Amino acid sequence: MSAVVPLGGSGEPDARAYRALQRELVETRNRFDRQVAQLKRLNSVAPALQQVDERPTAEVFAEAVLDVLDIGFGAVWILPSQAVITGPRFACLGWAVDEERWAMAGQALDALLHTTASNRAQRITTSLADLLPGVELHDVMAGRCIGRDGAALAVVLSANTPITTGADDAPGADALEILSLLAEKCADHLDASRDWHLIRDQMDQLRESQERLELVLRGTNDGWWDWDLVTGSCIQSARWHAMLGEPYPQSTVTDSFWLDEVHPEDRPGFEALLTATLREGAATVETEVRLRERHGGHLPVLVRGIISHDVAGAPVRFAGSILDLSERKQHEQFVHQLAFYDALTDLPNRRLLLDRLQQALLAADRAHRTTAVLMIDLDRFKSLNDTHGHAAGDELLRAVAQRLRDSVRSEDTVARLGGDEFVVLLSNLDEDHERSQELAEAIGTKILHALAEPYLLSVGVTHHSASVGVAVAHSSSTTPDTALKQADVAMYEAKSAGRNLVRLFRPEMQSRVDHRSEMETRLRAAVERNQLNLMYQVQVDADGSLYGAEALMRWHPDDGEPVPPTIFIPIAEDSGLIREIGPQAFQQACRQAVAWRPFAPEGFRIAVNVSASEFMIADYVAQVVEILASTGALGSEVRLEITEANVVSDLQAAADRMNALRNHGIVFSLDDFGTGYSSLTYLRQLPVDEVKIDRSYVRRFLNDRHDEAILKAILNLCTELDIKVVAEGVETEEQWNRLVADGCTYFQGYLFGRALPPGTSPADLTSESMVALPR
Ligand code: C2E
Ligand code: CA
Ligand code: CA
């Protein structure tokens, strides 16, 4: 109120002055009323502004501005969010608002306001013709409001068509003041609501992640704990208690809580880790420990914890999960067992043996001691397996494993390499090499005796000897592989020297083995290329007439000397190659029988040798029958020569097999009779048609009365049992004559013919000399 009422000179109030004063008073009152009205409206707006969540602050602000300033329409622009808020009265003009243009205008205004330092609202004269084409704007007011994160700009546009009187006056300083206040208020609320939204979002996220965590923990079966390091309170989840037992009584815990709970063996490591974690500011812990279970025992768990620190870096909270590892541990144990132990006997397997052997060799080297490896192979294991099946074989192997364990000290290792091969590792033997050899040999003998005891299996009582090879390692240069190989070589020697023996490895054995393994390789190739062929040796009766022919295998390598069957048949038997060679031989003989059929005399048979390991395979009978069928040969055209070795492991099974084949017309000859066991039992219990007296008797009996006596006894017995007798290896007429005189009826030998290629007729096998013999 600037006007001062002047008084007249006469002392009388001047009428004009009075009217002016009156008018001024009215104006003042009007202005005052307007301001009061504005303040009242402003007052009513304030609560709406407080309620940030109900409607966007800017919208409330827009309305408030329009209302308070009492202008016809307007728009409020809040930057930097650049949200365009149009007041209701603004919208009724029907302006289509192009956001892009608002944005441009907003930027222009922002730049403008930034040039002034004040945050107070100002009147801005700027052309917004572009922005609102066809609208004449009276006034543009802009107020800058400062939010916590920087400036936000509130812009008010006022239009040229005010709806209230008085508002067509340009907004006064007080209106600008109010606008400023409102703008600031709005900025505050924008910030506040943004904070509030932020907090709410974070809360939502937190809840979500907490729920997710719970779900995950439940899903993974983890138990969890949350330890407040400041108050000492520690809570554990239900799952924790389910894993470890009843809830813990203590309400507050200290470091010792953990240390008491972990297994004593794990304690030192865990203590160090916990100290490092809590004292030295590590952020996470992950370790495997065994935690005490309430009902006794310990549970292996994976502990995964996170430590939160306060601003000063002090740990305030330690929370995390425990994962039950018992199943995984069992699994690991199982895998370990599988990887390092033999499933059948629970003995260490080859891998673990090699590892232990390596350790033993190193330790022996340091302590100047020796290590011995005993390779043990069970004699005639295969035939038991083949006759009685794998269950019986398994039973035997378990029994053997037990006997071996009982034969050595607990610090020695007994391992199974596979099949019927076992190894005993004796560590820490004498410093003196020879002394160690003696010791190892003695233990080998002890093992031999233990293994030779009868085995009581489900299928009955069986007897098995073993062959033991011993290698004593004395220099550090011996590798586990070498030691095993040497023991193997020695074992092999024990086997070939007649089984049930212990042999010590000697360097010269190695070259024999090398030669043999080279031979095996060549034989394998020969089998693949069908380079093995049968020759036939004639068999005659007392008149020299054709009785039969024995098929004998011949191997003529392309690249060298012929190899005799006495060399390659044992190799084939040991290597398993006989299982291919045997059927091949039988098949060739069958084809020959068919080819000879038109020329063969009545009752003529081809005799085929069968190895023990071949005869005892489970489907031997089926295999023979199959070959008969495929070649068209008849059972009555062949004879199978078996030895005592074929039947010794199981007489009954052998008899069953033979009877099955006899049903197909096949007959059997007991080969090499008089050597080996020569048990008369075999003659009684087996369906044998023929016995072949070993050629060693034939060679000697003329000069040896003892041999002649045996020969005669065999002949008498066989005549009585109605078994034919073939004398093998008859080389001279004298032998032949004497044998005939003693009652022998059939003969085979160089005198009648050597093994020859088949030719067209079996008669071609007979030698010229024999035919010339006058009978
Ligand atoms: P074996 O079954 O005792 O065969 C008889 C062996 O005596 C044959 O030796 C034969 O050539 C030889 N021989 C025949 N007459 C005389 C003679 O008057 N004097 C002398 N000193 N020897 C004579 P070969 O062919 O070297 O066969 C040796 C062994 O090889 C056979 O002994 C047999 O056990 C085995 N064998 C040969 N062929 C086969 C086969 O196809 N399968 C199997 N499993 N073993 C075979
Ligand atoms: Ca034979
Ligand atoms: Ca023989």
Image (spheres, helix red, strand yellow):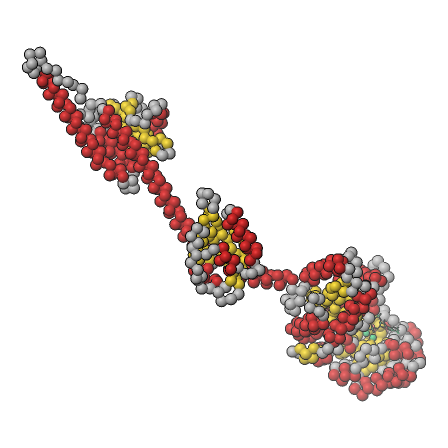
Is 419 placed above or below 559 here? below
How many callouts does the rendering have? 0
Question: Which residue appears at 17% of the width and 22% of the height?
Answer: 1
Res 442 → quadrant: bottom right
Q: Name the foreground residue: 4 vs 760.
A: 4
The x, y position of residue 121, in whole percent, is 29, 26
Report the side of 633 relative to 743 (left or right): left
Q: Name the foreground residue: 176 vs 461.
A: 176
Q: Give the residue at the far bottom of this rendering.
A: 720
Quadrant of the frame with the C terminus: bottom right
Report the side of 265 relative to 14 (left or right): right
Q: Name the foreground residue: 459 vs 332.
A: 332
Question: Which residue appears at 79% of the width and 58% of the height?
Answer: 475
Res 175 → quadrant: top left
Is 280 placed above or below 86 here? below
Examine the rendering and report whether any part of residue 584 can be seen. Answer: no
Is 343 placed above or below 237 here? below
The x, y position of residue 713, in whole percent, is 85, 86
Q: Name the foreground residue: 562 vs 129.
A: 129
Ligand 2 shows up in the quarter that is bottom right
Q: Give the residue at the far top of this rendering.
A: 9
The x, y position of residue 327, in whole percent, is 53, 62
Question: Which residue appears at 29% of the width and 34% of the height?
Answer: 185
The x, y position of residue 326, in whole percent, is 53, 62
Report the side of 739 relative to 89 (left or right): right
Question: Which residue appears at 43% of the width and 62% of the height?
Answer: 249
Examine the rendering and report whether any part of residue 564 can be seen. Answer: yes
